[in-house]
Image: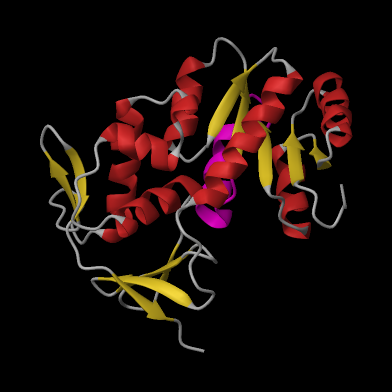
Amino acid sequence: MDSASATRLLLVDDEPSLREPLAEYLSRQGFVVTEAASAAEARSRLREGLPDLVLLDIMMPGEDGLSLCRHIGEALALPVILLTAKGEATDRIVGLEIGADDYVVKPFEPRELVARIRSVLRRAARGGPAPAEDELFEFEGWLLDPLKRRLTAPDGALVPISSVEFRLLLAFLEHPRQVLNRDQLLDMVQGREAHLFDRAVDNQVSRLRRKVETDSRNPTLIQTVWGGGYMLAAEVHRVVARS
C-alpha cells in the first residue's frame, strides 16, 4: 500500500507490552501507526499532524483516556476506538456517550480490532452522498460544512462538534421533517455492530441539542416524537459556500 494513501492511526496506550507489538501488527496490515504512551504525548502528536483514527486506552496515568476522548471529539472531530479492560463497562458507555465511535475489550484478537477500524472508517466516510466541494447545509441560520465538518452558528461563531454529533446532525439534515427512530439513528451514526444502547442515542441527541437549540430543555429544532424517535423540524437548504 502506498504510504501516501495509507490510513494513519494514532495508538495511545501506556503499556509498551501491548502498544509496541500492536503497532507492529497494524503496520504489517498496511496502516501507518504513530505511538503515544500518554495523553500528553498524544496531544503533542496531534499537534504535529492529524491521523485518520485514534486508538485510545481508557486507563492511563495522568490525564485518562475519557478526557482525551472528549477533547478529540469536540476539538478535532476524529474517529476514536476505545481500548478497555473487562471491568470498565461504565467507562465504555461514558466513552460512547462523549463521542467515541466504538470500543474493544482487552485482551482482544488483533484481527477483530482491524475489522472494527475498517468498519468505523467506512461509517465515517459514508455520511450519505458526497456533497459538492462548495456545498453547505443551511437550516434556521445555521451552516454545516460536511467536508470540513464545521458547524457555524447564526451569529457566525464556530461551534465544535464531535464526530458522532456531526454524523447525527448530518443524518437529520439529510432527512428533514422525517421521524427517525433510534434503530435508524444507530445505523446511520454508529452502526449496529457498536452495541450501543437507546440511552446512548438519547444522550447524543441531548448533547447536540445543547449545541443548536436556544433552550435545549424546550427544543424546537430537534423534536422528540413520542413512541417514534426524533425529527428535525426545520427547512434544510443546500447552499454554495461563499469564496
Residue farthest to the front? 129
Question: Where residue 227 sits: x, y (%)?
Answer: 12, 32
In the image, residue 9 above or below residue 88: below
Q: Residue at x 28, y 55 (%)?
A: 175
Span highlighted in magenta in the image: 57-79
In the image, residue 167 above or below residue 88: below
Residue farthest to the bottom? 243
Question: Where residue 158 sits: x, y (%)?
Answer: 44, 70
In terms of depth relative to the viewer, which is nearer, 203 or 235?
Answer: 235
Taking the image as shown, residue 213 lies to the left or right of residue 162, namely: left
Q: Reply yes or no: does residue 10 show up in magenta.
A: no
Please indicate, yes or no, whether residue 65 appears anywhere in the rendered image: yes
Q: Residue at x 68, y 49 (%)?
A: 52
Q: Residue at x 48, y 41 (%)?
A: 99
In terms of depth relative to the viewer, which is nearer, 100 or 120?
Answer: 120
Q: Quadrant of residue 200?
A: top left
Q: Residue at x 24, y 43 (%)?
A: 180
Q: How many marks?
A: 0
In the image, residue 177 above or below residue 142: above
Please indicate, yes or no, whether residue 71 appears anywhere in the rendered image: no
Question: Where residue 1 sits: x, y (%)?
Answer: 87, 47
Taking the image as shown, residue 211 lies to the left or right of residue 90, namely: left
In terms of depth relative to the viewer, which is nearer, 199 or 114?
Answer: 114
Q: Reply yes or no: does residue 68 show up in magenta.
A: yes
Q: How is the image coloured?
A: secondary structure
Question: Where residue 229 sits: x, y (%)?
Answer: 20, 38
Taking the image as shown, residue 80 lies to the left or right of residue 206, namely: right
